[in-house]
Every structure is written in C-alpha cells, then in structure tokens.
Amino acid sequence: MPTAFIKPGRSKSLERRHPWVFSGAVARIEGAPAPGDTVKILSEQGKFLAQGAFSPSSQILLRVWTFDEGEEIDAAFFRRRLEEAFSLRRQLFPEKSEKSALRLVNAEADGLPGVVIDRYGEILVCQFSSAGGERWRGEIVRQLRELTGAPTVYERSDLEVRSKEGLPQRCGLLWGAEPPDLVEISEYGCRFLVDIRRGHKTGFYLDQRENRRLAGEFAVAAQVLNCFSYSGGFAVPALKGGAENVVNIDASADALELARRNILRNDLDDQRVTHLCGDVFALLRRFRDERRCFDLIILDPPKFAESRHQLPGACRGYKDINLLAFKLLKPEGTLFTFSCSGMLEPDLFQKIVADAALDAGRRALVIKHLRQDADHPAALNFPEGAYLKGLICRVR
Ligand code: SAH
C-alpha cells in the first residue's frame, strides 16, 4: 500500500482523530497512489496513524477512512459503516414513515468523508464530494441496494467542491427507476414536494427539520416574515401553527413556485401568504423604510462564507440582515436566526447577532440555541461538522 509520512510535529490532529490531513503536513509519499486510493499514513518515525483516501489535487490531501491499522478498506468496510449509520437513524427516528426524509449518511460524522446519502421516502440521493468517495461510488451504491432495497438511487454530485478534487460535476440515475418530477415527503405532519433533480443540495434542507417544527410553535397568531424561504420549509409549519399571515422572500422564482404548491398541498389558505421574489437585503431595507413590522422573523440565509477569506464579508452580511430584522420586530417579537457557514464559530455568530441588536437599539434574550437535526451528527473530534447554528431571540 502507498504510504504517506507526516512531518514532525504535524501528527497531533491525527492523534486526536481529526480526519483531514492537509498537504502542508505531509513530508513525502512513497508509492504512486491514484486519486481515491487508500494510503497508509505514518508519522516521520514510522508509527501508524491512520488509513485514508488520497486526493492529489485537493488541499486536503488525505481523508481518513479508519484509525485502525488492521481494518481493510474494502466492500465489507463500507458495508459496516453504512450499517452503523443506518442503525443510528433507526434509533433516532424509530417512527419514520414511508414518506419521511432523512440523512442516512453524513460524511465525516459517519466515518465516510465525502459521502452523503439522503432518503426521500423510498428514494435515495447520493453526493460524492471527494476522490475517495468517488473511488468507492459503485461499491457504495451496490451496498445501498442490498441494504435498503431502494427502487431508485440518484446522484447529485453537482457540487462546486468537486472541482477542488479534480472531479467533474455529475447528476443522474445510479440505479433503478427514474425518480418522479416531484417526490412528496412528510415532516411532522407537513407535506413537502421535493425536486430531487434540480432542487438545492439533494432537494431539501433536511438539517432544519427540528427548527422548522419549533418555528411552528412560535407562529400562533403571528405575522411572519420568512426570509430565504426556499420551498416554504418554515412557511408551512408556521401556517399550520396558526400564523395570521406569512411573507416569503426568496431570490429564486422556482423555489417560490414550489413554496406556493407546498402551501396548497397542506390545504392551507394561500391568501394568507405573500411571495416576494427578490433580494432579502434590499427588501428588508424597503420594509424598514415602510415601517413594516412582524411578530416572527426567520433568517435562514445560504452559506455566506465558503472559505476563510470570505469570512469578514460574511460577518458583515449576517450583521446587516440581523440588524434590519431586529428593527422590524414588534415588541415581544421573536427572531429565528441561522448561519450554515461552517467557518463561522457559534460564539462569533452570537456576537454578531448581539451587535445587531445593540445597533438596532433592541433588548434581546436568547431563548434557545439551535443546531442541525440529529440525522446530521458531528463527530466530537471534527468540530467543522457542526456547521449549522441558530438562535431564537426574543426582543423587548
Ligand atoms: N429556509 C429554507 C432553506 C433556505 S436556503 C428551508 O427551510 O427549506 C437559502 C435560500 O436563500 C435559497 O432558496 C436561495 O434561493 C435563497 N437566497 C440566496 N440569496 C438570497 C438573497 N440575497 N435574497 C433572497 N434569497 C436568497
């Protein structure tokens, strides 16, 4: 097996079981591994550290499959990892119905860096984002068919990060029957149509499941402003929870059209909903100038920081929308505010929100800290995996 030697003083993170090895930490590689091949990772003195997949064109040169020297990376390895991941979900969501949607495999957290598998009803959707995931793609699909009997396995590897791995974007059927244009899923009694082929991520933001449910509880008789609404993930539970009305804002007309269909699908009164296609930053300013106000505001923006050098700009973006939201909230109003930028640490996010409240002249309390739902776990020694953070703030 090809072998990578880690530079002296650079093996600490591997010893602490962090699964990434950056190219700068590698002294040399013996053998000639192809992209995705398994490489033995040793300290300079030759002590075994891990086995990982080789990504020659990425800054993350090696992604660890196992810290066990005796474990072979083969079909049986992937079967064990998949079974472990499925067993966790069975325990977490024992009542899962035929129509529910779940993340079955969450990459590093489930010991499978570069591999994400989501289930929408019976249909499985995979994303392979690294050379290692790509290398084992066929085997993983074979195991998925055997373990789940899914009638459709679809691929959504249309990810920007794949270019860093030297991989092309790719979407399409991996196995079985073509999926329908829209798949219906159910989440805490809310029905959603999901576009597996063209929707964001693998079709739906599954990580917000529990937070959407909570928003429903805060929506009783509320006038709701749902910013970055996508297909109405927060709008449907808010209306079901008794919201008086909801304003959905999104830059995508397709997303808003799906939101409209989702609202009707739940037999909710679409007269209570306004859909605004446009830029949240601009529309929040317009609402401020018009002195509009709301009882409940949801800010669920896309990832503002994709890399470390984008962090300062991202922080300004978060500050801006949170400041405007605080200005638009009625006394005793509630803000659900999120960041899914993994680079932004939770403490810094909270500081930004605190500064926004201060500048808006509002007193605010944190009622609850939020995170991604439990089917998106994060390994304790991989804090980057805890990317989604949110706060429920009550203003005075
Ligand atoms: N809350 C949603 C997920 C939001 S994803 C749910 O629970 O399903 C982020 C959304 O923001 C995307 O739909 C994207 O189209 C939209 N978006 C991105 N930038 C935007 C902007 N500047 N103004 C308005 N919408 C934007």
Image (spheres, grey):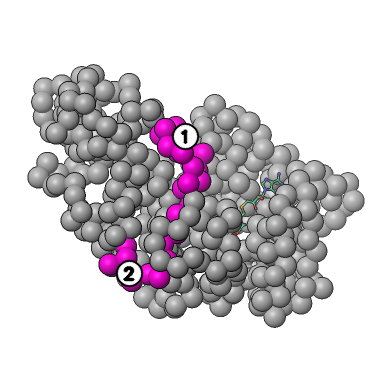
| Closer to us: 275 or 288 | 275
Q: Which residue is drawn at 40% across and 57% down?
A: 174
Viewer-closest of 336 and 1 = 1
Q: Is residue 34 above or below residue 65?
A: above
Estimate the x, y position of residue 265 in percent, counting from the top left.
Answer: 66, 76
Pick the residue in front: 135 or 64: 135
Left or right of 247 in this view: 63: left
- Amino acid type, callout 1: Ser
For the point 19% across and 46% down, the residue is 73
Quadrant for the N terminus, please: top left
Q: Tell me what residue is drawn at x 54 percent, y 60 percent.
A: 196
- The residue located at (23%, 19%) in the rendering is 27
| Residue bearing mark 1 | 163
Specify the segment rendered in magenta: 144-170
- Element under disc 2: helix
Q: Is residue 138 above or below residue 222?
A: above
Which residue corresponds to mark 2? 148
Q: Which amino acid does label 2 sit on?
A: Thr
Query: Sequence-wise, which precedes: disc 2 or disc 1?
Result: 2
Residue 227 appears in view: no
Of residues 323 and 99, the one drawn nearer to the viewer in this rendering: 99
Q: Where residue 171 sits: x, y (%)?
A: 49, 51
246 in the magenta segment: no
How many C-alpha atoms fall within 10 Å of the one at disc 2: few (<14), some, or many (≥20)? Answer: few
x, y (%) of residue 210?
51, 65
